[in-house]
Amino acid sequence: MNYHSPVLLKTSVDALNIKENGIYVDVTFGGGGHSKEILNRLGKNGKLFAFDQDPDALENRIDDHRFVLIAENFRYITRFLKFYRIEKVDGILADLGVSSHQFDVAERGFSTRFDADLDMRMDQKSTISAKKIINRYSEEKLANIFFLYGELRNARVLARTIVDARLNKKITTSFELKEVLKLHLPKAKEHKILAQIFQAIRIEVNQELEVLKEFLEQTPELLKEKGRLSVISYHSLEDRLVKRFIRTGEFNGDPEKDFYGNTNEPLKKVGKLIVPTSEEIKENNRARSAKLRIATLK
């Protein structure tokens, strides 16, 4: 697939335990790889709903009477399923992060490889872009983003450098940002540090962690009894949220206990953490950081 090579394709769809006439949701449609695999396993009365807010992804729409593509952010999953009179589903799949297509199209501004406009919006209708964050956010807010979302120890130094530089000239492209920060990009670690900086900005632009939390909180109410949740994440911030929610039903603190000290987590993990094989990583380098977690409704 030119648009996007799906990671853990068979394994993540196997995790859904597909019923021939079931109802499923692919909340990150992208190039349609996971959706096609689900449709291949569904019978004529099965149904698949997919979500994607990226206009480019809508070009990959699948012509199948069992398929509905919803051009919205998956944080609104319950609202839009109700529009189609769907209250409960048999399984939900999420392949988080950025698609290969988004990284490879220079003008989208996701990649450190191209000198492109600082954009990084998955939803082109959004008013928040990477350019706005870099040029308008306060030093403190920038430092927080780099520290929390990029896990960068020198977050404050990076923020101060950006704020000082933009006093003289607006920072508008990815290469301009790299030039501003070059003193803090040692050759041996340049790619890694830039990836962390771009990740932090992208997460803020698209509110990725908030979207993920809102989505996960809705899944217990949407899943039928024994329904399955299959989630692929690509960095520790996402994976921690998924792991913790499956384990406790919370993102922070300890789960609530009843009078007898029992907790009531809505989901139960299925199997162990799954990572790609060395063969898959060799075929698709993007797979190297992927982690698949599976859960079922208790």
Image: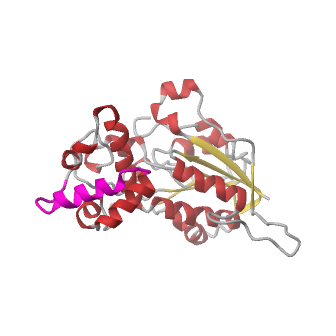
- Magenta range is 151-172
Does residue 284 lie above or below 162 as drawn? Answer: above
Q: Residue furthest left?
A: 168
How far from the left and from the top, in percent, is residue 248? 71, 60
Q: Residue furthest bottom?
A: 259
Q: Is residue 171 magenta?
A: yes
How far from the left and from the top, in percent, is residue 295? 71, 52
Q: Identify the residue shown where x is 44% and y is 63%.
A: 207
Q: Is residue 89 left or right of residue 163?
A: right
Q: Is residue 170 magenta?
A: yes
Q: Nearer the viewer, residue 142 or 13?
A: 142
Q: In terms of image quadrants, where is residue 37?
A: top right
Q: Is residue 284 visible?
A: yes
How far from the left and from the top, in percent, is residue 58? 41, 53
Q: Nearer the viewer, residue 248 or 97?
A: 248
Q: Nearer the viewer, residue 204 or 77?
A: 204
Q: Is residue 212 left or right of residue 261?
A: left
How far from the left and from the top, in percent, is residue 240? 59, 52
Q: Identify the residue shown where x is 30% and y is 42%.
A: 112
Q: Residue furthest right?
A: 260
Q: Is residue 94 visible?
A: no
Q: Is residue 87 left or right of residue 102?
A: right
Q: Is residue 111 left or right of residue 73?
A: left
Asked which colour scheme the image uses, the reply is secondary structure
Q: Quadrant of the N terminus?
A: top left
Q: Nearer the viewer, residue 286 or 94?
A: 286
Q: Quadrant of the C terminus?
A: bottom right
Q: In terms of image quadrants, where is residue 13?
A: top right
Report the number of discs.
0
